[in-house]
Image: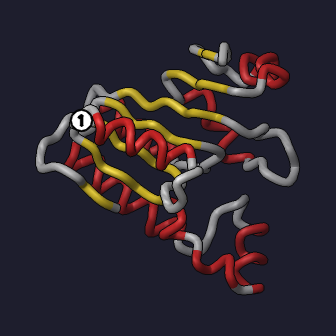
Amino acid sequence: MSNSTDNTHGILIIGFTTHPHDVGSALVLAAQSLNLPLAVANISDYESSLNHLWGKVFYRIAQRRTLEWFDFQRKILDLIGKFQPQLVIVTGIIPLGQDIFHTIHNYQGKIVNYLTDNPWNPALGSPIFRDNLRLYDCVFSTKTAIIPQLLRVGVRNLFSHF
């Protein structure tokens, strides 16, 4: 977790930001180039258990959450409480706890998802993520084929014209 400024009420990016080709990395660079108050929660920091067989087994049993995931959720909540972001951008299929959505909304913030994968793909999907799709203020999807499914699960604001 990093916070590039002491200002609050900026942008929180939750996603993969380790490699330059990660969507989260591109969003971080864009926010930095605009000198926006920014906090980052890099998911890669919370999945080292996937390097072990027991971690992979847990991941399957726990609906695509790692052993570190529960600590990650707590740290995201702490970061939201301290930073009070106006906008939270989540990149990808990340099974956030519903308390994260409620906390963001309690601070009058908005949470959006930039979705580049199909959450109904058995290899990628998470039931928790799919259940929470309706809680996002907006979903940006690069997959036009899943628009009917997104609307069916209650996504209220959808943008897919890329």
Residue 142: x and y, percent? 70, 27
Q: On the rendered structure, is 38 left or right of 69?
A: left
Q: How many marks?
A: 1
In this view, the residue farthest toward the right is 122
Residue 122: x and y, percent? 87, 49
Quarter occupied by the C terminus: top right
Q: Is residue 161 above or below residue 28?
A: above
Residue 159: x and y, percent? 61, 16
Q: On the rendered structure, is 55 left or right of 140?
A: right
Q: Which is more toward the observer, 113 or 149?
A: 113
| Residue pictured at 24% horizontal, 55% vertical | 3
Which amino acid type is marked by label 1?
Leu
Q: On the rendered structure, is 67 left or right of 53?
A: left
Q: On the rendered structure, is 6 left or right of 111?
A: left
Q: Is residue 92 above or below residue 75?
A: above
Quarter occupied by the N terminus: bottom left
Residue 108, located in which quarter of the rendered image? top left
Mark 1: few, some, or many residues within 10 Å (few <14, many ≥20)? Answer: some
Give the colour scheme of this rendering: secondary structure
In this view, the residue farthest toward the left is 6
Residue 137: x and y, percent? 49, 23
Q: Which is more toward the observer, 116 or 52?
A: 116
| Residue pictured at 51% horizontal, 69% vertical | 46
| Residue pictured at 49% horizontal, 55% vertical | 17
Q: Secondary structure at mark 1?
A: loop
Residue 8, located in which quarter of the rendered image? top left
- Residue under label 1, please give it: 36
| Residue pictured at 28% horizontal, 53% vertical | 79
